[in-house]
Amino acid sequence: MVLPKVNPLIRISGLLQALMIPLVGIAMAIVAWGIVSLRPTGNEPGSTTSPPVANPADDAADGDLPPSGSAAFLIFTGETDDLVVRDPIDEDDEGEVVTSFERHNGASPRGQASPDGTRVAVVHPALHAGARLTIVTVADGKEVMSPAVVDDNTTVAWERDGSGLVAVGSTGVDDSGRVSSSLLHINARTGETRTLATFEGVYRVAPVGYSSDGESLFVVVIDQSGSELWVLGEEQREVVTSLSSGRTRDWALNPDGTVLAYIEVRSGATVPTVGRAVFTATGAPLHVSDTTSPQQGVVWRPGSVHPGFGGPGGTLRLEDSISGGEMAAFLVPEAWSPDGTDLIARVVRATITSNEPLETWEVFRGAEPLSAPGGSTGPARAVLFDEQSEVSFLGWVTDTDAPTPE
């Protein structure tokens, strides 16, 4: 079995706690987490030292910061989901629509940008069942679609050179929900698709990324025994370690492929979701999160040795105001920019007046003087999309006028 190569990911650390917030506010934040979490969303081996809790601006360099480039979003217009590329730092940039996807069966598309930011892979619902995967070139909007049907919740692991990616297609659901899941390699230029490996009798298979040399693919397999980290190579297919006796989610491989961070789902526990991390070579734990509240979302900041977790108990602290019947709640971090200066995240606020939490998309920019909504202190920040928007973030990408990749 010959495997392709890639996938770096990014990071941040994450929690948000309003100053002097009453206990009822904390309870509301956890309730808000419960609603949002239902949506499709020390560096030595053996170390279990927790990373320091930090505001996202604390690590930012002082002075002028270089531009981070553009970001790709899928934005629902009421009829289609538009793939929009915009500069999240430029408040006057309304973005450019690269292409659009129709909705089928009420399901929304999502996806991930390639490591070099020249392409995005979009998983969009098929007309009758399942989903299709289309690769879009950012510069010219050229589309290449795989002939395979893929899972609508598949993760995507890009090759390090952006020439291809791995997704998952499943068949044969039994009475207990187990399926036969195949890892599919898709050529980014031609859409040619081939099967790399198949796992039988599983609940889910998730490719999470590649080793630094691109020769080994890391895959999370969830079955009735729990979650396991597998490694697949040309002459290799074996379990690295058990991640949990139950489900896991929000997997994020660090940029050099040496550490996998993830959220462990602990049914019936006081804290139902907790951040974890293991070394991909040995399975040894890097970090066991100390938290008394749920965590959600995992990212890596370029150059950091620790993953960051979002949610009410996350490792990102954000100071926000309390006004207008709203209470600060928590962040769900999406991705740091490639230069590590800008963070895109969802900000979820509990509200006294509604059972539904308010959710906005925001960008946090080191020391740049962006507007700070609500008079908040802490990092410079700006709202990208308000609570009325239905948005999916694909990643940081090149500008639409950049050269077309070969």
Image (tube, grey):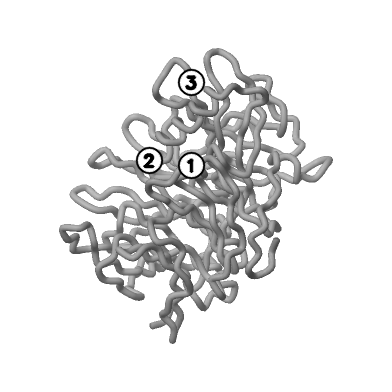
Front one among 129 and 268 = 268
* N-terminal label among 1 and 2: 2
Left or right, 187 with reference to 364 = left
Residue 290 position in % (x across, y down): 60, 49
Q: Which mark is residue 201?
A: none
What whole-number distance in Å separates the C-alpha atoms at marks 1 and 3? Answer: 26 Å
What whole-number distance in Å separates the C-alpha atoms at marks 2 and 3? Answer: 18 Å
What residue type is disc 3 on?
A: Thr
Q: Quadrant of residue 149?
A: bottom left
Residue 288 position in % (x across, y down): 58, 56
Instruction: Name the residue beneath numbered marker 2.
Output: 38
What whole-number distance in Å separates the C-alpha atoms at marks 1 and 2? Answer: 21 Å
Instruction: Name the residue beneath numbered marker 1.
Output: 73
Q: Is residue 180 visible?
A: yes
Instruction: Name the residue beneath numbered marker 3.
Output: 351
Residue 355 position in % (x across, y down): 39, 22
